[in-house]
Amino acid sequence: MLSLLEFTLTSLLIELTPGPNMAYLVALSLSEGRRAGLAAVAGVTLGLAVVGVLAVLGLAAIVAASPVLQDILRYAGAAFLLYLAWEAWRGADDGAHQPMGRRAAFGRALLTNLLNPKAAAFYLTVLPLFLPKEAIGSTGLSLALVAIYVGVATVVHASLVLFAVRLRPYLLTDGRQVVVRRFFALALAAVAFWFFWESR
């Protein structure tokens, strides 16, 4: 029971540390609103869950043991985020801007997390530290820890989205819409470089 509590607190501390998901969700929520932000949270949640299950099944260990596969994921993830930044910058003008929509926000957040080798590294290195010696290799307990981590991450991410949405009316006035959306594009570009550096 103590290990589960310790793991929950560790997961909370990790998720409260600024990272690519946090920056992306806040910027997206400021630019597109609550629905797109929460849809992206759902995408992040599913991505973290899928990577966690793959890690428990041992597939993530194959990626962790292959520098080539890690580099492919890093470059693909960073390139995808840079593409999103370019797309957001191009459509920042009031007349040209088209709302992303919940489906697109969900899919992009999901893909970004599936391409993040750092998530697999967490499951392979941190999660086993909280397994009792006799339970190492236990699929059931490992999946329970994955569920706890994903749950904590979802609560933190959803809270960030709702907080950003509360600020939106003060920032997204008629004279500031283009500025906020340009900021969103620059934030995505920064997240891309951050993602590439942190996942090396």
Image (cartoon, rainbow, N blue to C red):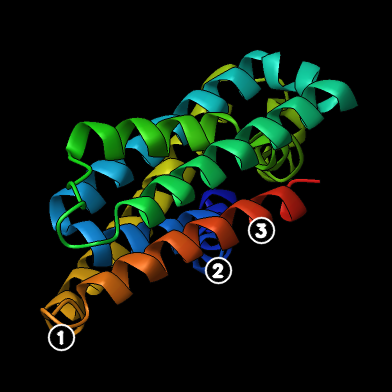
Question: Pointers 1 and 3 in contact (CB under 8 A)?
Answer: no
Tag 2 and tag 3, C-beta contact below 8 Å: no
Mark 3 lies on residue: 194
Q: Answer with mark 2 or mark 1, whichever residue precedes in sequence.
A: 2
21 relative to 2 in the view: left or right = left
* Residue that mark 2 sits on: 18
Label 1 belongs to which residue? 170
**Residue 40: image x %, image y %?**
31, 44
Is residue 14 among the parts visible in the rendering?
A: yes
Estimate the x, y position of residue 99 in percent, counting from the top left.
Answer: 17, 47
What is the three-letter code of the residue carrying label 1?
Tyr
Tag in front: 2 or 1 = 1
Q: Amino acid at mark 2?
A: Pro
Which residue is at 63% across, 13% downward? 57
Closer to the camera, 75 or 115? 75
Q: Amino acid at mark 3?
A: Trp
Left or right position of 183 against 82: left
Is mark 2 in CB contact (under 8 Å) with mark 1?
Answer: no
Packing grade of label 3 (10 A; few <14, some 14-19, many >=20) is: some
Q: Is residue 152 visible?
A: no
Of labels 2 and 3, the one closer to you? 3
Measured along the vertical axis of the image, is residue 79 above or below residue 89? above
Q: Which mark is residue 11?
A: none
- Circle 1 SS class: helix
Q: Residue at 38% across / 67% down in the picture?
A: 182
Q: Nearer the viewer, residue 129 or 58?
A: 58
Q: Which of the pair 107/14 is nearer the observer?
A: 107
What is the distance, in whole Å, between disc 2 and disc 3 at their CAs? 11 Å
x and y percent of residue 102 in the render?
Answer: 18, 38
Residue at image location 79% in from the left, 21% down from the top? 69
